[in-house]
Amino acid sequence: MNERSQAPPPGIPRGEQILRDVDRIEKWSIVWTLAAIGMWCWFLCLMLIGYEAGGVECRAPLFHAEQDYSPCDSGMRQWPVLLGVLALAVIPTVIAAITTLYAKLLCRIASSPKQNAHPSAGSPL
């Protein structure tokens, strides 16, 4: 990376640029959190809610692992598919946690005394 891409635009202090980045990253973390919540709700619905197939009332996979009726062999209610949905739900959850943590870290950096110090009075670092 070159230094030009990291430098804030002229007239904008570095702290304000970091706060703009924090705002943008917080918005992305909200999007990822909503995606994670949606995926977890989908997974829980597949696991916990009974369903009807071919006129037969079928129990949820968590409460009855193997159905006695062939109409209850729904593709979305099989354990390999459920584990796949679970794995897909974990991905946005981890990304949401990382982006939230990164936004909070940037906010702390922006409010640190070193960041707000005047460049001419600053330390050699």
Image: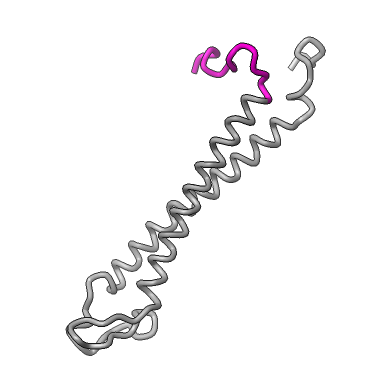
At horizontal 53% and vertical 42% (from top left) the residue drawn is 27
Q: Say above or below: 24 vs 65.
A: above
| Residue 27 appears left or right of 40 | right
> Would you say residue 65 sits in the magenta stretch?
no
Q: In this view, does 84 lie to the left or right of 120?
A: left
Residue 23 vs residue 114, the one in the foreground: 23
Camera-side residue: 56 or 85?
A: 56
Q: In this view, does 20 lie to the left or right of 70?
A: right
User: Which range of residues does the magenta coloring cover?
Assistant: 1-15
Residue at position x 30%, y 80% in the image: 51
Q: Which residue is drawn at 22% across and 81% down?
A: 53
- Residue drawn at x 67%, y 19% is 13
Compared to 5, does 89 lie above or below? below
Q: Quadrant of the C terminus?
A: top right
Q: How many marks?
A: 0
Q: Is residue 109 above or below residue 120?
A: below
Question: Which quadrant of the structure image shows residue 84?
Answer: bottom left
Tell me where residue 96 appears, x and y as whole percent.
51, 49
Q: How is the rendered protein coloured?
A: one colour
Identify the residue at the far right of this view.
Answer: 121
**Above or below, 79 relative to 110:** below
Q: Where is residue 59 in the image (x, y as percent from the top left)?
A: 32, 85
Dominant secondary structure (helix, strand or loop) of the stretch shown in magenta: loop
Q: Pinpoint residue 7: horizontal percent, then vertical percent.
A: 58, 16
